[in-house]
Image: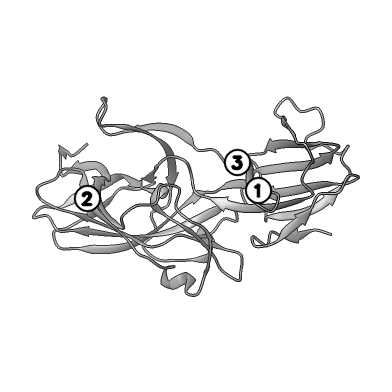
Amino acid sequence: MIEMIPWTAEYPLELDRALRVRLGPLELRVSRRARELRVSSLSDPNQLARAPEVDHVSPEDEPGGASPKLNTWRFGFTEEPSRLRLAPALADRPVIIRPEEPLTLLPGEEVRAYVSSPVWLRLLVGEARRLLLELPSHRPSDTWFGPLDHQGQLCYALATHLSLTWADRLWKPHRAITPVVIVNSAQEPFTVARLRVPVGQLSIYGTPDRRLWTERITLTRRDDAEGEARVTVDGEPPREAEGGELLSPPRAPGGRSFTLRAFEGALFGRSIA
């Protein structure tokens, strides 16, 4: 029986059946054998809108058949686990959002925007919920953010909407939505061409309609720091996901207020990159 992924459920791993999981472009199978678990995965970029599903299939029915894109992992155990839990996680690097159209803020202006980023799928086994494997539902391309020295950082790049109003069309099943408040406290206008989202400091919350959200973050730009912003992370789900259930804590928990390089763009002709 096919069902939407209930993130708080555990799934039995049967010897004669494979657990099949689909999350956006990612499809994987988890097969249980004597003292072994085998995971096979395939990514199909044409399935960005596919609903997250989980069911049991024949263990011989591998995703993609003999596709060269098929990846397989084997894990050995003294006694193989008989149950599996799925958990979403945010990316393992910061995500750089490149709006399809840059956004300019005049001095003193503040906007609330919405961005989304692909989640990683964690496979947890046993009563201790040990991490078996972690796979991206859709792996973004690599990009460098900041100066070309030790002050810069390898990140993921996403060309996407920077929408100032929430609409259902912005939601994709394999992505987590982050509300971002951008505040221009400087004395000059500035244009956002690239925006860094520190996903490592964010949690994931689930809502009854199976959507994934993070906390709201506020990025405040000041006069004395070109490209830098004061970041504030709310300690609760955003208003759009009020009452949401915590599914995954931050990868890199720390303070909820910090400073980092958050913007790259143009200050009406002068680079702030």
Residue that label 2 marks = 229
Label 1 secondary element: strand
Q: Residue at x 20, y 45 (%)?
A: 228
**Is the Cβ of the residue at disc 2 closer than 8 Å to that at disc 3?**
no
Numbered label attached to residue 124: 1
> Measured along the vertical axis of the image, is residue 26 above or below residue 207?
above
Q: Earlier in the sequence, mark 2 or mark 3?
A: 3
Question: Which of the two labelled residues, at mark 2 and mark 1, occupies the earlier sequence position?
Answer: 1
The percent coordinates of residue 72 (x first, y second) are 73, 30
Q: Spatial distance from mark 1 to mark 3, Cα to Cα? A: 9 Å
For badge 3, the amino acid type reads Glu
Query: Mark 2 and mark 1: span between their CA atoms?
Result: 36 Å
Answer with left or right where residue 51 lies relative to residue 159. right
Q: Residue at x 71, y 50 (%)?
A: 126
The residue wearing badge 3 is 134
Label 2: few (<14), some (14–19) or many (≥20) C-alpha neighbours in 10 Å: many
Residue 271 falls in which quadrant of the image?
A: top left
